[in-house]
Image: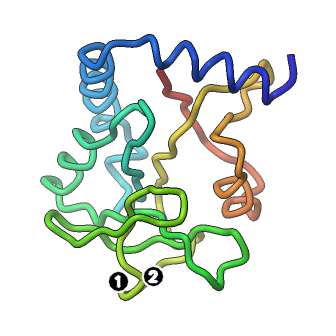
């Protein structure tokens, strides 16, 4: 099965999961991550805002704020050559939809952070392939953004 077929199959399976199940899974995963040593020592953490039945990282984001972490969201910058930048995010910040319909901070959010300046990145995913590689929605933004990394320490968490 190629990556596109696997992505379609996993998305179909994810649509079958109940909102209650997804909410419980998000809560459980948040509880596991907040005690992880990598999370505990990270100061600048990027999150995403869930769309299309993605696992919602909001419980983890709220906990990060409570712990005094600097929280960031990805932003599609028109001059970034299809790579993500990261904008500071605080409760009640104004968000706008990008051309994919995904909420993001406004371009005037400052300062924007390049990927290399982050300590930890919580990324959305559809699933992973038989080699353990992340499967996203297929546009490659996270892949291009983090292509500079020689190794990635990752825990694949998805529903």
Q: Position of residue 117 (x, y in %)?
A: 52, 73
Horizontal arrangement in the rendering, residue 79 relative to residue 88 (left or right): right
Which image quarter: residue 41? bottom left
- For disc 2, the neighbor class at 10 Å (few under 14, some 14 to 19, many from 20) is some
Quadrant assignment for the N terminus: top right
The local secondary structure at tag 2 comes to loop
Which residue is at 78% across, 18% downward? 130
Horizontal arrangement in the rendering, residue 145 relative to residue 34 (left or right): right
Residue that mark 1 sits on: 109
The local secondary structure at tag 1 comes to loop
Q: Position of residue 61 (x, y in %)?
A: 26, 49
Figure check: 19 above or below 72 = above
Horizontal arrangement in the rendering, residue 121 relative to residue 8 (left or right): left
Residue that mark 2 sits on: 112
Which image quarter: residue 145? bottom right
**Figure coloring:** rainbow
Which residue is at 25% across, 23% downward? 23
- CB atoms of marks 2 and 1 within 8 Å: yes
Nearer the observer: mark 2 or 1; the answer is 1
Number of numbered labels in the structure image: 2
Figure check: 99 above or below 151 = below
Which residue is at 34% across, 26% downward? 29
Q: Nearer the viewer, residue 131 or 84?
A: 84
Figure check: 116 above or below 53 = below
Give me the disc on residue 3. none
């Amino acid at each position: 099965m190629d990556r596109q077929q696997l992505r379609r199959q996993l998305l179909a399976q994810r649509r079958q999961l109940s909102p209650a199940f997804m909410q419980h899974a998000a809560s459980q995963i948040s509880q596991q991550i907040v005690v992880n040593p990598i999370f505990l020592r990270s100061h600048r953490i990027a999150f995403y805002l869930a769309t299309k039945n993605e696992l919602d990282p909001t419980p983890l984001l709220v906990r990060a704020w409570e712990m005094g972490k600097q929280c960031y969201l990805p932003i599609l910058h028109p001059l970034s050559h299809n790579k993500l930048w990261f904008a500071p995010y605080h409760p009640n910040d104004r968000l706008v939809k990008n051309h994919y319909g995904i909420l993001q901070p406004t371009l005037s959010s400052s300062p924007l952070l390049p990927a290399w300046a982050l300590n930890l990145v919580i990324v959305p995913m559809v699933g992973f392939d038989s080699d353990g590689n992340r499967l996203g929605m297929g546009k490659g933004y996270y892949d291009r953004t983090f292509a500079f990394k020689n190794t990635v320490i990752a825990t694949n968490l998805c529903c």
